[in-house]
Image (cartoon, rainbow, N blue to C red):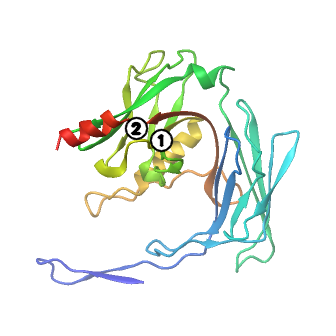
Amino acid sequence: MCIAIAFTHCTEPMDINLNSIDKKVVIYGTITTDTCAQCISITQSADYYDNSTPTPISNATVSISDGQNAYPLTESVNEPGKYYTDSIFHGETGTTYTLTASNVMLDYFTEPQTYSATATIPSLPNDYQTYYVDSIKVEYNSNWEGWEVNCWANEPSDQNDYYMFRVYINDVLYSDSIENLVLSDDKLINGSSTGGATLYFISEPDTLKVGDKVTLDLCILDKDYYLFLVEAQTSIQPQIPLFSGPSANVRTNISNDALGFFGAFAIIKTSYIMRPEDIQKKNDSR
């Protein structure tokens, strides 16, 4: 690939050659405390400016182990390259999980390869589902023309926590990309209460209607997965100035020179039902 870049005061164009590179295996997925079919995706990497859908890698043998039991994953018939646990599977806090993907093939491999990674769901108190979050409320902010998801929660002082916040509207994920996740550590709030702090912002004013259910996921991550997400968000932001140095490579915990990440985290869900007065406040501000 060749790009010609010319500026008004340049005497000649500058050619930047962006050569194709060998494809790599990309493995991404998480284990959470939710009881559901948990997903691991296996695809192959693409060139930098390739905007096509990642090519899935099928027919791998994928399993997750907690050190005592191994849980096989099954490739989806309708979604090649995506491998799912049983729908009754859920992770346990304080447990380390090992992902193994074997029989993985790319065109230039001479034989199938095996990849692995480990991830730990942070250890939390037994009452974590009720201790951390008391309630949420969704309020319209007329200055920003959007909806604040405000949360009343407790932050324990005896551990360092790393958080991810995401939102569902009527059980459909609104935070459907890495750039739409909200990430935070507990440096500024360690051991205190949030007192109705805004943890998420829904920017489209007309997204919510009376009776809609807004669910906040407060996810408690380990440090390494938190840093992976921070680095991933940074890597997709525009680089200013244009000729600034390249971003550092996003970390990976997948073995055998693969890309991607295997993460694990606990989830605390809290919901709010939109009331007529919530919508009226928005309408009155216009």
User: In the rendered image, which residue does mark 2 sit on?
Assistant: 274
Out of 270 and 228, give the one closest to the viewer. Answer: 270
Residues marked 2 and 1 touching at CB (< 8 Å): yes
Residue type at mark 1: give it. Answer: Lys
46 sits to left or right of 238? right
**Residue 97 shows up from this direction:** yes
**Residue 204 shows up from this direction:** no
Q: Earlier in the sequence, mark 2 or mark 1?
A: 1
**111 above or below 121?**
below
Q: Give the alpha-carbon distance from disc 2 to disc 1, as whole Å.
A: 6 Å
Circle 1 — which element? strand
60 sits to left or right of 271? right
Return the x and y of residue 49 as percentages of the image width and height.
Answer: 43, 74
- The 10 Å Cα crowd at callout 1, few under 14, some 14 to 19, many 20 or more, is some
In which quarter of the view is residue 268 placed?
top right
Residue type at mark 2: give it. Answer: Met
In which quarter of the view is residue 202 placed?
top left
Q: Which quarter shows the N terminus?
A: bottom left
Q: Which quarter shows the C terminus?
A: top left
- The 10 Å Cα crowd at callout 2, few under 14, some 14 to 19, many 20 or more, is some
Return the x and y of residue 90 as percentages of the image width and height.
Answer: 73, 41
Residue depicted at x 70% and y 47%? 36
User: In the rendered image, which residue does mark 1 sit on?
Assistant: 213
Out of 268 and 50, give the one closest to the viewer. Answer: 268
**233 above or below 190?**
below
Return the x and y of residue 140 as percentages of the image width and height.
Answer: 29, 37
**223 above or below 31?**
above
User: Farthest residue toward the left?
Assistant: 9
